[in-house]
Structure formats: structure tokens, C-alpha cells
Image (spheres, rainbow, N blue to C red):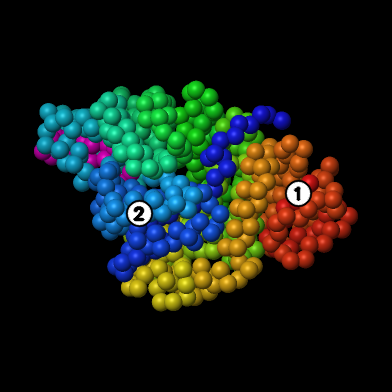
Amino acid sequence: MAEISKRPYKEYSVYQIWPRSFCDGNGDGIGDLIGVYSKLDYIKSLGVDVIWFSPLYPSPNADYGYDIADYKDINPEYGTLDDFKKVLDGAHERGMKVLMDLVVNHTSDEHYWFKESLKGKDNPYHEYYHWHEGKNKDGKTPPNNWLSTFEGGAWEYNENLNEWYLHVFAKKQPDLNMDNPKVREEVKSIMRFWLDMGVDGFREDVITFISKPANLPDGFPLPAATGVEHYKNGPHVHEYLKEFKDEVLSKYDCFTVGESPMMTMKNALPYITEGENQVLDMMFHFQHQEADCFMTEWVHTPFNLHKLKKAFSTWQDALYGKAWNSLYLENHDHARIINRYGSLKYRKESGKMLATMCYLQSGTPFIYQGQEIGMTNPTVDSIDKYKDVLTFNNVKIAKKLHLSDKLFLKLANIASRENARTPMQWSDEKYAGFSTTEPWFVLNDNYKSINVKESEEDPDSILNYYRKLLKLRKENEIFIYGDYKEHYKASGKLYVYERNYEGRKALIICSFSEKGAKFKAPEGFDLSKGELVLNNYQINKINDNGFVTRPYEARVYLF
């Protein structure tokens, strides 16, 4: 067995809050910090150790907070810096840490830096962004053929300057020029501001995109994100992240997790391999999010368990003893996992099974608000009710492809990241206990039956299962530091793996099928001698060292 180092962040579990939809404390229909403060005891009761906040900063909300207008303040919709300090202190008093979202690939076009950059080529802030002249003589052809991920071309023309600025996401999200040392100093100042306040680390948004090649080569033509191959693992990204770590992060007791779209395990290892060149503690990748789609959830395909197992096992096998995994099923950018990989018919069973499958692997669990009660995708009945720039961009693409509104709406109800952004369902009261007034976005109609209050009262709820699961992980180091070995690789119904640590063994058995699957314990495991420590069905019989699974059954044996 490879040796594995112990680190505090490896033993944590993290709860993600997307603040706009978590809890409204002042009755304006928008989630806020007062609401978060009122729910700190609930969050603590889950057994988590860390709260990760999606962006809380002032923002015009072109991308709901990921377009930042001021990195050192709080969005007035969410409260004040004093409100944040109250939440931070409240979390710390309860033994929980706080991660902030660090979004430094781009700013809002309403940030002071960008507004100054518009004033002229001799303005010192002009070099904070990627301003370039166009290709032809009149300057009105973009510098290259890059397309944004969110909104058409990746270049926006400014008539007064006769130049183009780069935005690999929305038009109102101009990319920062990280090659400028002054920009890197600004990033370090932002980090110090929050760390000095007492924040415990950062989730770093699309952090592997921050370095762009100076010669701006054309990209391979794609429907969106043309050019991404040139900056998804850019020429100076390791150098800049090492600078941030050596000059700031290493001076504090903190940890980092980097978000990295289109990341492969091979390319991830240089960022997260433990040792002097490590620049991130963990990384969010997306490969296990592609088991029901091709690259993006908007290109929907039937769920494929083999793809899911291969994605998880590839990272588990490659990282063990070298680097550390992040484990997640949902976040603010993905539709609800029960709709995708589970079953609405067997919502409770599949919700518990999915949590078991994911969070007993090697890595730090990240749980998204509402996931712990089994929230599902809403049924949105009109395109006009959507709010997100990415959905709007996909409407335009759908029209070019001559998709009907009806077909697009059906696809959006499956694939849109807005499926995860409906207000948190706290109770069966009006507006789901989220607010005393109509929320900013649609409520899921099922809040009457799926909510925290109902889940608290049901000992067999998904919520209470999550509590048991996180407690089991915390009390048994095998589920943190044990190695990983997959069994039944060829099965299209079962995901089975073992963990081993210091003479103990665990066997995790998960069924992804409504139909029964015959399971027999792998060689070296005698189920009759194992302790059944977690399961999502009441009666669990063993016959000939095996059993036939029930719909979406999960069992965990400890030896």
C-alpha cells in the first residue's frame, strides 16, 4: 500500500452555500447572510466541518456573483461586511471553517479596474485586461477566432479605443491579464484581505484558465469555447499559482481547492501532487459529471454507469498516496444528481445510494445545499422564467439549430444549471420557508413534501442518512485514508469497491438499477463476518455470501 500523509483538510466535509437561494433573512425574496446565520446550527448538525460560500461580493449579477465589481466587500443584496464577520465568527464558534470563492480569471465590466481601462491605452489599468488590436487595417476583426463559453465570440470591440477585450465567459466578465505583475499583486492583496479577516481558504474558480498565450493563436473550431485548448492549462499557470502559494497561502493556516474544467487526471497531478511544487490542495474536475452527457449536460445521453465508474476509479487509483481527491455530486453548475444518476421513483433510496457511492471514496466530501434532503430539478414551464446567461446563450444556439421552444424547454429542464439554483426548501409553509415573500426564482412544486422540516421528523430521511454517513466517515479512518480497489468493473448495474487501511477492510456495494442484481462478495470477503455499518433498506439478508439487490440498494460492510 502506498503511504498516505495526514492533513486536516483530508478529514473535513464541506457544505456549499449558493447564497442567493439558501435562506432569506430580511424578506426581500433573495437569500442573504442574515438567513445563513439563522441556519448555522442546522449546517453544523449535518456533521460538516467547512462552509464554502459561492461569491458574496458586489456584482451586477450578469453571472450571479461570478462577475465581481469589488473583491473586498459584500453584495448589499446579501448584507454587509459586519454581517459576514458575524457569520464567520458564528461558524468558528461552532467549530466550522469558511471557504470564500476566489474568482480571478475575470472581473465584472463594472469593476473600477475595467472602467479605468476604458479611459485610454495610457491608463495604468488598461494593462490589467487583455486589450488587443483587431486583425485587419480598420481593426474591426477580432484578434483571433476564440469563442466564449457563455456568450458568442470571446472578443468585444470598443469603438473609442479601436481595440478588443477578451472574455472567455460572458461579455460582462472581461478576463484579467495575469501576465501583468500588478494584477498578481492585486490577487495577493485580495487573498490577504480575507485571510487576515479569518477566512480559512479559497475555492478558486476556473483557476487553470488564468494564463493566456501571448501570441493568441486561433483555436480548433467548436460550437462554443473555441480556443480553450490554448488556455485551459495555460503557459504560466503553474508559475503564477506557485507565486500565490509561496507569497501568501503558505503564510496562513488555510487550504485551497481549484476548479478546473476539461481537466484530465494526468494534467491535474502537477498542480496537486504533494511536495514542494504543489500549488493546490485539491481540484474539482468534471469527468464524473459526464456519465449522462457528452462534454456538456446540454448534449444529453442516457446514463452510463461504466463511464461513471471509470471516471471515479481513474482518479482514485492515480491519486492515492500522491495527491488528494475532492468528492462531489452536485454544485451550483449542475442539475440535481437524483434526476441525473438516480431515480425519482426511488428518490430516497437512490439519493442515499449516490451519497454512499461517492463520499466513502478517498477524498474530501463537498455537499451542495439541498442535496442532503434529496432536492430535485424543478419543472419550469416557460423559457422566460430562466435567469442565467448560460441558458440564454443556449437558447441562441438552439435557434440556430432550429430546435423548437418546446424541445429546448424539455432539454433545459434536464440540463440547465439553474435546476440547482431553486430556493432551498426549508418547510411546507408558503415559499418553502425560504422567504416571507415571492422568491427571486421559481420554487420547486414538490417543496410541500421535500423539505428540511419533513426530513428532520423522518428518521429514515435522506438528511438523517447523510448525518450517519458523515459520522461513519469521521469515526473510521479507513474511509478517509484507506486505499481503493474497484470490483465488478464489467457490471452495468453494480458499483462495488473496497477500502483498506491498517489491517481493516471495508466493502461498499451500490446498485444503480431498479431491477435486482445478483451480488456475491469478492474473494477475501465473508459478509457473515462483516459488520453492516450503513444501509438504505431495513432488512438485509445474506445467502451464499451474497444477495440480490433491491432498487438502488447500498450496503457498507466493515471488517
Q: Residue 56 location, x and y as percent?
A: 33, 51
Relative to residue 259, is residue 329 drawn left or right?
A: right
Circles 2 and 1: CB distance less than 8 Å?
A: no
Q: Residue 290 location, x and y as percent?
A: 54, 47
Residue at the (32%, 32%) spot, across then down: 188
Disc number lying in front (2 or 1): 2
Question: Vertical placement of 459 versus 353: above or below?
Answer: below
Residue at the (29%, 53%) spot, across then down: 82
Dot placed on the residue nearer the N-terminal end, 2 or 1: 2
Res 415 label? none
Residue at the (51%, 43%) spot, across then down: 286
Q: Amino acid at mark 2?
A: Lys
Distance of mark 2 from mark 1, alpha carbons?
A: 41 Å
Q: Residue 386 location, x and y as percent?
A: 35, 62
Q: Nearer the viewer, residue 11 or 507?
A: 11
Q: Main secondary structure of the magenta part?
A: loop
Element under disc 2: helix
Residue at the far front in the pictured view: 93
| The residue stretch that appears in magenta | 156-175
Q: Which residue is mark 1?
A: 558
Report if residue 63 is visible in the image: no
Q: Residue 409 location, x and y as percent?
A: 42, 64
Residue at the far right in the pictured view: 544
Q: Which residue is mark 2?
A: 86
Q: Amino acid at mark 1?
A: Leu
Number of residues whose C-alpha sits closer than 10 Å to that of mark 2, classed few (under 14), some (14–19) or many (20 or more):
some
Q: Nearer the viewer, residue 122 or 224?
A: 122
Q: Is residue 142 inside the magenta stretch?
A: no
Residue at the (49%, 61%) spot, across then down: 42
Tag count: 2
Element under disc 1: strand
Report if residue 461 is visible in the image: yes
